[in-house]
Amino acid sequence: MTKGGSKVGVIDAGIGTWRAFLTILDYLRVDAEVVRSPESIANYSHIVLPGVGHFTPAATRLEEGGWVAPLKKFAESGKPFLGVCLGMQLLGTKSVEGPGAGLGLIDFETTPLSSDGPFRVPNIGWNRLSVNKEHHLLQNRAQDARFYFSHSFAVTEGHSASVASTSHNSPFSSVIVRDNVAGAQFHPEKSQLHGINFLENFVSW
Amino acid sequence: MRLTPLLLLKGDALTKTEGFTGGKYVGDVVNTARIFNDKQADELTLLDIEASLTGNSPNFKLIEEVVSECFLPISYGGGVRTSEDARRLVDCGVDKVVLNTALISDPRLLGEVASSIGASSTVASIDVMRSSDQYKVRNAPDSTLSQLLRNAQENGAGELLIQDVIVDGTKSGPNLELARYILSETDLPVIYGGGVSSLDQTKDLWRIGVGAVAAGAWFVFNGPHDAVLISYPTRQKIDMAMSEVVSL
């Protein structure tokens, strides 16, 4: 059953967990599939790039798996593209975490979370968003909306493409959007009703 | 500040221990996970307490079923012996892999797992008991607690799960002294479990800097005869507790 003809592809490039996305999208009655071949990316109306782990091996896997050019082409097509957690960081140019090139779809560099304060690193747990610019992805969110984060690196707040920030000793960008390319530092697939709402917004984007 | 049900798996059923021994039947793990999902628990921690003894691998099929019931983060531990096990768990949808026995039996594994699936997905779990005047680690007569804490941090763990063996299952209150000691010996986020049975006790732990409070008996037993009943505080009560901690 499809919602308005969307077909969401969730990338499995060996760098992140696609399974929970399929579960949630299935729950939302959205036509969604795991995508294992870069050539087929163009067939989808929306693409999700999940990512968990270390920047360098992930960047290498994207390169070696032939994902880089097809993902860039998808981004150029104007169709909605969502990078999650490490997937968001891979939308940028590079990361202090290690060598390797991101997709360069948004011009930012990923840096370590600040440990200068009462909060320990990694940032593992539920946090709120401070929305700087209203965006379709963030509409209809609950007053007390909270999202699950699990990371040691992030994009420093202040980037022009950042639409929401979250604080962990210092603020970082929790949602970043440039045209049709979006990144979420949190895990919408693990954020219960708030995450479900976010993904519903992504599918209707 | 998180509050996580800590569920113990024996075979394909949930059990609850006291002092890390025995095992009272709690129920079906998939149903129970579904209930915690409905109650919007912060995350679920599922530990297979037999796997390292029997030599079995994690029950991937069962774990996948549990994950499919939940739109919240799930940590799994028990029988993880290789980084392929860890990777496979992550592919099943597990968010954090917990290593306990392997910290002692195969010290290199922690680093391998953390490199493979990321530090923020890797939890080092240590069971502690007080013996005369010092802390000892269960099943590790040759390692000290501070050695293991240091190893965990140096080898890339993202979080520590510390359980107090003696108050396990007793609901008699947490060992705040142990929690304070751990917090002072590590920079990593700490999950504390053992004896926690109320939001007031949870606040005490959050107040001193514990990142996540884990509880078992509190959420699976009810009443003076410990009848099995799955419970979890309402979101409202938890939010109130959190704001009380922050406002101090």
Image (spheres, coloured by chain):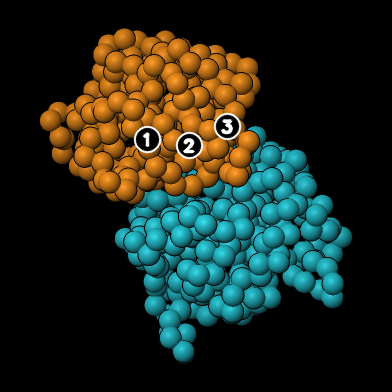
Tell me the subunit letter for badge 2.
A
Going from N to C along the chain, the mark reached first, 2 or 1, is: 1
Disc ID at residue A167: 2
- What residue do we see at 26% from left, 45% from top? A142
Q: Is residue B109 above or below residue B236?
A: above
Residue A112 occupies quadrant: top right
Tell me the subunit letter for badge 1.
A
Residue B219 occupies quadrant: bottom left
Label 2, label 3: how far apart the Cα atoms are: 10 Å
Q: Position of residue A5 (x, y in %)?
A: 14, 28
Label 2, label 1: how far apart the Cα atoms are: 9 Å
Residue that numbered label 1 is attached to = A130
Q: Are marks 1 and 3 in contact (CB under 8 Å)?
A: no
Which chain is orange in the rendering? A
- Secondary structure of the residue carrying numbered label 2: strand
Which chain is cyan in the rendering? B
Q: Position of residue B32 (x, y in %)?
A: 39, 66
Residue that numbered label 3 is attached to = A113
- What residue do we see at 55% from left, 58% from top? B206
Closer to the observer: label 2 or label 3? 2
Residues flagged by tags 1 and 3 on a common chain? yes
Label 1, label 3: how far apart the Cα atoms are: 17 Å
- Amino acid under disc 1: Ser
- Of the pair B87 and A139, the residue shown nearer to us: A139
Left or right of A14, for residue A43: left
